[in-house]
Image (cartoon, helix red, strand yellow):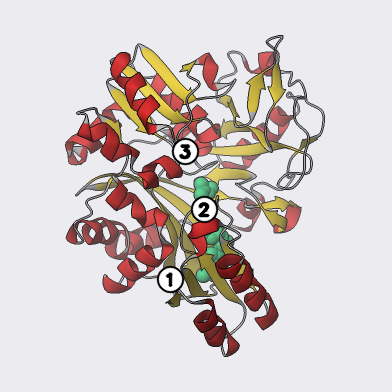
C-alpha cells in the first residue's frame, strides 16, 4: 500500500513510525512532514490546508490510504473532499469533526445526551456574556467556540479577568472568528486524563490512557503550551473510572453523534477531568493528541493500518486492540522562550545515540534540514524523547536519561514530567 499522512508535528512522526511498522505498507508520503518524519516517509511540500493540491497528489501517486493527523483540515472538511473523489481517507467528515470544531456544539450534545460535563452557558453577544459574568461564581472558564491552536480557553479567577477575557475573545477577536461564540463553563477541579479511541461510526475501542503537561514550567507554572510531556498509562485511570466512562461517556458519545446524523469515524480523544463527583468530559478532540500519541502508539501491538481500515469499513468490532503491559514517558525538548519568543536554526546533534536503541524514540516536532543537510531547530517544541519501561517510574528514568543524548543551543525541558506518578 501507499499511504499519505497529512501533518508535520511530533504526533504525525509517531503515526508515520507506526505505519512504517506495517507489513502492508511499501511507501509513505507525508505532507508537509519534518526532518524526523523524512526517515520513514517522503516529505511533500504541501500544506495541510491545501486540499486541492493534496487531492491531486493523492490521485497522481495512487495513494491507497490518507491519514489526517491535524484538527484544522478535518474541521475544514478534507475528508469530504477526498471521499467525493472516491479516495480512502481516515478521519471524521466535516459534519462530525465539529465535535472538536465547536465547543458550543459539543456542550449542547453532552447536555442533550446526558454525558457528564461541566455546566455552561453559550453567548453570541459580548454584552450578554458580561452581564452573566457579573454574578458568576469564580473561578470560571471562558472558551472560544472554534479552533484556537489550543489557546482558546481562559481560566478566570476574578470578575475583572473574565471581563478582559470576553473583550479579547469576542470584541478584539484574539482568535478570529473562533470567538464569535463564547462558552462560559463551570470551573472543575481534579486530575486530567487523556483517552484516545478508534471509532468506526458505531463501534468504539479505547486505546490506553495518558496524561499531558500543558504548562511551560515545572510545577504546572507558566503559560499554556501545546504540551510539554506525557506519560501512559495514567495510574489515575482506574478500572472504576474505565467502567464509568464505558457506561456513560464513550459509547454514549458515538451514539449521540449518530443520532444527530453526524456519524463519526476516526479518532475521538476524550479530555477527562476526574472530579469528586466522578469523571466529566472537559473536551473532545477529533484526532490523535500531541504529545499523547508519542506515548500511546509505541505501546500499541496491532498493525495500525488494519485498524485504520477497519474504522473506514465499519469493521472495528472485529479488531481486538492490544497494548503492551508496560509504560512510556515522553519529555518534550523545546526552544528556550517557548511558547513566547524563541530562536530557531540551531543544529541538533545526538540522533546516532538512538540507532538500534530498543524502546527509545525521538519524535520530531519542529525540525528541518538546513542548506547543508544538517538537522536544525525549526519551532518552539523541537522534539519529544519517548522511552518505554516496565513501569512508569522506569520509563520516566529512561526518558530523562535519554534527553541527555540530544543537544542543541537553547534546549529547554520541564524536569517534572510524570511527577504525578509518585502521587498515585
Ligand atoms: P480544553 O482545550 O477544553 O482541554 O481546555 C484546556 C485546559 O483548560 C484543560 O486541559 C484544562 O486544564 C482547562 N480547563 C478546561 N475546561 C475547564 C473547566 N471547566 N474547569 C477547569 N479547567 C478547565
Ligand atoms: N495534548 C492535547 C492535545 O493534543 O490537544
Of callouts 1 and 3, which one flags the residue occurring earlier in the amino acid sequence? 1
Residue located 52% across and 86% down the image: 132
Residue located 60% across and 20% down the image: 35
Near-viewer residue (284 or 29)? 29
- Choose top left, top right, bottom left or bottom right for residue 107: bottom left
Gap in angstroms between the C-alphas marked 1 and 3:
24 Å
Residue located 61% across and 60% down the image: 174
Q: Tell me the crowding category of disc 3: few under 14, some 14 to 19, or many 20 or more residues within 10 angstroms, Cα based.
A: many
Q: Which mark is residue 90?
A: none
* Residue that numbered label 2 is attached to: 235
* Residue that numbered label 3 is attached to: 296
Q: Which mark is residue 278?
A: 1
Of callouts 1 and 2, which one flags the residue occurring earlier in the amino acid sequence? 2
Locate residue 104, reporting x and y percent.
40, 67
Quadrant of the drawing holding the C terminus: bottom right
- In this view, 37 is above or below 227: above
Which residue lies most toward the right here?
A: 409
Near-viewer residue (40 or 7)? 7
Gap in angstroms between the C-alphas marked 1 and 2:
16 Å
Secondary-structure class at tag 2? loop
Q: Where does ligand 1 appear, by image quarter?
A: bottom right
Left or right of residue 255: residue 29: right
Secondary-structure class at tag 1? strand
- Choose top left, top right, bottom left or bottom right for residue 361: top right
Near-viewer residue (209 or 135)? 135
Locate residue 99, reporting x and y percent.
35, 56
Of callouts 3 and 2, which one flags the residue occurring earlier in the amino acid sequence? 2
Left or right of residue 104: residue 381: right
Gap in angstroms between the C-alphas marked 3 and 2:
14 Å
Question: Within 8 Å: ligand 1 and the Cβ of disc 2?
Answer: no
Amino acid at each position: 500500500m501507499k499511504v499519505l499522512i497529512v501533518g508535520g508535528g511530533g504526533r504525525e512522526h509517531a503515526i508515520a513510525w507506526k505505519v512504517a511498522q506495517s507489513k502492508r505498507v511499501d511507501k509513505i508520503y507525508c505532507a508537509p512532514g519534518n526532518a524526523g518524519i523524512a526517515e520513514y516517509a517522503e516529505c511533500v511540500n504541501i500544506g495541510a490546508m491545501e486540499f486541492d493540491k493534496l487531492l491531486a497528489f493523492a490521485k497522481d501517486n495512487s495513494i491507497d490510504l490518507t491519514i489526517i493527523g491535524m484538527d484544522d483540515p478535518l474541521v475544514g472538511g478534507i475528508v469530504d473532499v477526498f471521499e467525493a473523489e472516491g479516495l480512502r481517507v481516515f478521519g471524521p467528515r466535516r459534519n462530525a469533526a465539529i465535535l472538536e470544531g465547536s465547543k458550543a456544539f459539543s456542550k449542547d450534545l453532552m447536555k442533550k445526551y446526558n454525558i457528564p460535563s461541566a455546566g455552561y452557558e453559550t453567548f453570541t453577544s459580548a454584552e450578554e456574556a458580561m452581564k452573566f459574568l457579573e454574578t458568576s461564581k469564580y473561578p470560571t472558564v471562558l472558551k472560544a467556540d472554534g479552533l484556537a491552536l489550543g489557546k482558546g480557553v481562559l481560566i478566570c479567577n476574578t470578575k475583572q479577568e473574565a471581563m478582559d477575557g470576553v473583550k479579547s475573545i469576542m470584541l478584539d477577536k484574539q482568535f478570529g472568528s473562533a470567538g464569535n461564540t463564547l462558552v462560559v463553563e463551570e470551573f472543575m477541579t481534579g486530575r486530567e486524563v487523556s483517552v484516545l479511541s478508534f471509532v468506526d461510526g458505531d463501534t468504539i475501542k479505547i486505546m490506553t490512557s495518558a496524561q499531558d503537561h500543558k504548562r511551560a514550567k515545572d510545577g504546572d507554572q507558566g503559560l499554556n503550551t501545546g504540551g510539554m510531556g506525557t506519560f501512559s498509562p495514567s495510574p489515575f485511570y482506574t478500572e472504576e473510572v474505565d467502567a464509568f466512562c464505558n457506561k456513560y461517556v464513550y459509547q454514549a458519545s458515538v451514539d449521540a453523534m449518530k443520532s444527530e446524523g453526524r456519524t463519526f469515524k476516526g479518532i475521538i480523544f476524550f479530555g477527562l477531568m476526574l472530579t469528586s463527583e466522578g469523571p466529566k468530559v472537559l473536551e473532545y478532540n477529533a484526532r490523535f493528541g500531541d504529545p499523547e500519541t508519542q506515548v500511546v502508539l509505541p505501546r500499541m501491538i496491532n498493525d495500525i493500518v488494519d485498524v485504520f481500515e477497519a474504522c473506514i469499513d465499519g469493521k472495528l468490532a472485529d479488531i481486538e486492540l492490544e497494548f503492551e503491559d508496560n509504560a512510556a514517558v515522553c519529555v518534550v525538548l523545546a526552544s528556550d522562550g517557548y511558547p513566547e519568543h524563541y530562536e530557531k536554526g540551531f543544529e541538533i546533534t545526538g540522533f546516532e545515540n538512538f540507532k538500534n536503541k530498543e524502546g527509545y524514540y525521538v519524535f520530531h516536532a519542529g525540525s528541518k534540514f538546513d542548506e547543508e543537510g544538517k538537522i536544525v531547530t525549526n519551532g518552539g517544541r523541537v522534539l519529544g524523547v519517548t522511552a518505554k519501561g516496565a513501569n512508569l517510574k522506569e520509563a520516566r528514568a529512561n526518558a530523562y536519561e535519554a534527553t541527555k543524548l540530544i543537544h542543541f543551543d537553547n534546549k529547554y525541558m520541564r524536569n517534572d514530567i510524570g511527577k504525578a506518578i509518585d502521587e498515585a
